[in-house]
Amino acid sequence: MSGSAHQLRCTECGVVIEKDAASSDFRCVRCSGLYEVVYAWSSANAGTRSSGAAGGCLPNASALRYLWEERRTSTLAVDQSGVWRFRDLLPIVDDMDRVVTLREGNTPLYDLPRCAKAAGVDWLLAKHQGMNPTGSFKDTGMTAALSVAAERGFEWVACASTGNTSAAMAAYAARAGLRSIVFIPEGKIAWGKLSQSMDYGALTIQLKTDFDGCVKILGELVRRFPIYLLNSVNPYRLEGQKTPAFEMVEQMDWQVPEHIIVPGGNLANSAALGKGFSEMYQLGLIARRPKISVIQAEGANPLYRWFMDENRVMRPVTAETRATAIRIGNPASWRKAAAVIDELGGWCEQVSEQEIALAKAEIGAEGVGCEPASAVTLAGLKKLVALGKVTREERVVLILTGHTLKDSAYTIDYHRGELFGEREKAQLTAEDEALHAALRKPPTVLEADASLVLRAIESHMGRSQISQPQLV
Ligand code: F0G
């Protein structure tokens, strides 16, 4: 399938517009709602299908599966990309030769047997989106939206970010030879992410506000200058971010897990994955859709509050959490995420700072690791199991959104026992304290004296509960 045969549909009022008719802030001119990309075959666009909304004949499900598998052996950049390999379901650019790709996607699906045990399920997998080129799931969305920006002739792109979007945008803009502007909250992003945007040559502006404040300033900027907005209100971002759903079921031999668990910040990713599963379902690629549950940090929990509120009113909060990636109080895509939870029958939970830290250490101890925001998934799963929302036999996939090296300061503080203050430590139960103590691995500083080192290791082995081979 060639050509960018698609339109944009407002997810609030339903109005459908041509692909280049959106305003610079990607808000519906009628109702300020967010758009989604629709194709001739989208059920969302069914009402306009007969009017020839978008042309092209889609191959059937088995032809698609075959085509996608075949592309895996190709040497073409677009085939090697785990996003553009599925391009038949995201025809958003005209010229495939001009796609901006770092061979994103193709991320591993790991099993986490010890985390499964800790959570009380038989079977637990993690789709590690932190294994993308810039270390987070944002790359899958950025290759899509930045390719659109490049094709439409923009010279400048911009985003507000808690750090990962900016890292991804800066990298893809550099690849395309575009200039990029990053707004990040001063002092509230992890060093790994800040260093990336500088390394990839972005104009990096640290604002003395939070993420929500950065979004406001960015809005002003794109209204005044011809700068392409790359936050997740841009619907093309979600087209890239839906592809891990395709990749995941392909990796599972086209079986569908019962439950997907996603961290919630600005709430676009849960919406994107929901769209991916719904499109596969609609095209007959899968026979049913999984539940999608969203987990937030207690200090940044507007969706959780909405979910628990019997009147279902969304009230923004002032966000505070050490999981800085999801330190967001006024999420742009909350309606899209809420629709996915309701439609697919998922749940929303919140988790505490200590629960996040424990879950992160547990994922690290499996040799996988992730950044703090990703660990909310395991912490949330434990709660969903306790509430009976996930049963032991269900196949659950956690979406790990960022690489552990993104925020190494957090990890080091945790293992040194310096992450929490005395007041927070005092809140821990004896059982939790024992769990943390077993996981914490602070570095040991020793003189470079062999007998001293051997003695220290010997005493460590003596303390270890795991049986060790005899020293000879
Ligand atoms: N996990 C990580 C590692 C993130 O960086 C983000 C969002 C999320 C989860 C939440 O995803 O916003 O789609 O609900 N980071 C954005 C950023 C906001 O600017 O990098 P979401």
Image: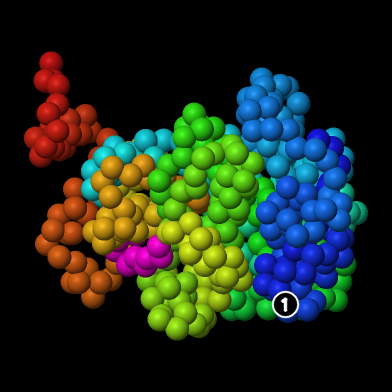
Residue 413, position in %: x, y? Answer: 34, 58
Q: Which residue is drawn at 28% across and 42% down?
A: 393
Query: Badge 1 local density, few (<14 within 10 Å), some, or many (20+)?
Result: some
Residue 42, position in %: x, y? Answer: 70, 51
- Examine the rendering and report whether any part of residue 388 can be seen: yes
Of 158 and 57, the residue lying toward us: 57
- Examine the rendering and report whether any part of residue 322 can be seen: no
Residue 364 is inside the magenta segment = no
Residue 207, position in %: x, y? Answer: 64, 75
> Residue 348 vs residue 384: left or right?
right
- Against 140, residue 155 (above or below) is below
Callout 1 secondary element: loop
- Against 3, residue 386 (above or below) is below
Q: Mark 1 points at which residue?
A: 32
Q: In which quarter of the image is residue 26?
A: bottom right
Q: Residue at x 78, y 44 (%)?
A: 91
Numbered label tally: 1
Q: In which quarter of the image is the C terminus?
A: top left
Of 165 and 261, the residue lying toward us: 261
> Residue 250 vs residue 33: left or right?
left
Q: Which residue lies furthest to the right in this view?
A: 153
Residue 31, position in %: x, y? Answer: 73, 79
Q: Quadrant of residue 211?
A: bottom right
Q: Residue at x 69, y 33 (%)?
A: 60
Q: Which residue is drawn at 79% across and 65% down?
A: 16
What amino acid type is highlighted by mark number 1?
Ser
> Residue 164 vs residue 50: left or right?
left
Q: How is the image coloured?
A: rainbow
Residue 353 is inside the magenta segment = yes
What span is in magenta? 347-358
